Amino acid sequence: MRVLIRCDGGGDQGVGHVIRSLALAEEAMDRGHDVLVAGHFEGAFVERQLNASAARVLPLPPHRRVDGVDSPLPLLASHPADVLHLDHYEVGEELAAGLRDGLPGGTLLSNMEDGEFGRRPAHVVIDPTWGSEEAPRTPDGSRWLLRGAGYAAMRHQVTRLRGHTPDHPEAAASVLVLMGGTDPVGLAPLVVRALGGTGLSLAVTVIATGSNASAARDAAAGAPHLRVSVIPPVDDVATLMSEHHLVVSAAGTSVWEMCCIGVPMALVCAVPNQQDGYGRVVAAGAAVGLGGPEALSDTAGTAGRLASVLLDGALRRRLTGVASGIVDGLGAWRVVQTWEQAVAAGLPPAAPPAAWVARVATMDDARTLWTWRNDPVTRASSRTSDEVPWESHLTWLEAALARTDRVILLVRDGSGDDVGTVRWDEQIPGQWEVSITVAVERRGQSLARPLLACGEEHLRRTRNVTAYLAVVHQDNEPSRRLFTGSDYLPDLPADAGGFMRFRKPAPVA
């Protein structure tokens, strides 16, 4: 598979666009794909990140815009690809037309958006903002929506550090101040001034350049109890994060790296496009919120908020516990697996036949369900392959029908015959795992896909559903085809038993 990644970064454009693009490039190359990263890049730090990557890199001049928008289509014409992935905020109407009419060579269009920023229709849409999967998104023809922090793409230098952070003493001794690529608002010196206002003896590392570096040193001069080291951006900032008791950071893409590692955070909402992610992370108790740039001007107030977390080891441990549950480090794997599946995908799944009806099972269906469950073919593809005794089945079914986190459906076709059963088990609130059994006498009639669609529709109408889940053995090719053909996407790699998990987001009204 040939992957063309178009992104811009460095300077005031946002280093995060480049970093997450390189994370996807890294994963794609690990899976044997050819990757070209193209864009206009600025700054020594970004240049070093690109040079360290094994991906081919194509530097582009500043935007050559058509009708005010930089078009990637000429680039695609000169560098054909199976996947064109965009990670920048320029939005062109021609891409919507390309999605409708087909991009050159049948290229799959993938787009990275951050809420409303950079939003455009695409075959694959990725929004790694935590909680974005719960927000309505106006339908625009996009087929696969990868939304939520589970799709935050992490580089290997981040994932290898997951869980490897220092113990948290009651009083923190070290702080890292990290305000993004160029810190255009000049926040780092304000943070140093506030740290000085805590009166605590701290070793403080500040990443800053130019006038911000000078201003940070000046702020430190007024606080002799601080041991301040001001350094330029480093290539392996993830290791630096993991070595400090607290990181004070802008609420950009580095937040997801700190979540993945498990780093205590105090966050500043530096620019408007960080507001949504900042608010959710702080509200969840994964970080201490310091507010926006204007709040940092209140040195005493900011010092008080910083002191409260610096002097409370239990609080910092709670912060890391919540944060590490937000990002699991599999985001890049999920995205690249989706690209692979989407490139090979056929037509979108059809709606269930209008004449088909799903109904909740009762004890009167016990004999039918027992017969289907004990069929040798069914048992061979189940996690538990033992035959179920009749009395055990009756006891299980009676208890199952009384549960609110389990739904057992029988599906009837237009002729009035039962074609199979669909069972849903709620794994976490809103996420339901499916189990399907086709009636023994109806096998070989391609009924599994409409059976699944009918079960999804019934569950959506009767329960709170944010996602449908399916667990399939990696060697069970018919089941894998069923779920991938129904737009279920890889969510967890195979476990020790060989079972993979697939996930399909439910529409958000």
Image (tube, helix red, strand yellow):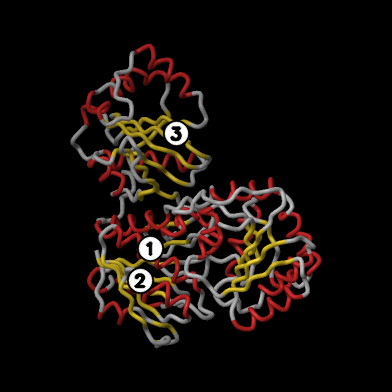
Count neighbours of disc 3 (C-alpha within 10 A) and say few if under 14, some if 14 to 19, many if 20 or more: some
Query: What's the amino acid at mark 2?
Result: Ile
Residue 451, visible in the rendered structure: yes
Q: How far apart are marks 2 and 1 (CA)?
A: 9 Å
Discs 1/3, front: 1
Name which residue lies at 48% across and 60% down.
128
Query: What's the amino acid at mark 1?
Result: Leu
Seen in the image, is 440 located left or right of residue 261? Answer: left
Instruction: From the image, tell me which residue sits under label 1.
Output: 24
Name which residue lies at 27% across and 69% down.
107
First in sequence: mark 2 or mark 1? 2
Q: Distance between the residues labelled 2 and 3?
A: 38 Å
Name which residue lies at 49% across and 69% down.
16
Q: Which of 160 and 391 is in front in this view?
A: 160
Location of residue 373 by image quarter: top left
Q: Where is residue 455 in the image (x, y as percent from the top left)?
A: 38, 38
Q: Which of 427 and 353 is in front in this view?
A: 427
Instruction: From the image, tell me which residue sits under label 2.
Output: 5
Q: Distance between the residues labelled 1 and 3?
A: 32 Å
Instruction: From the image, tell me which residue sits under label 3.
Output: 425
Tag 2's secondary structure? strand
First in sequence: mark 1 or mark 3? 1
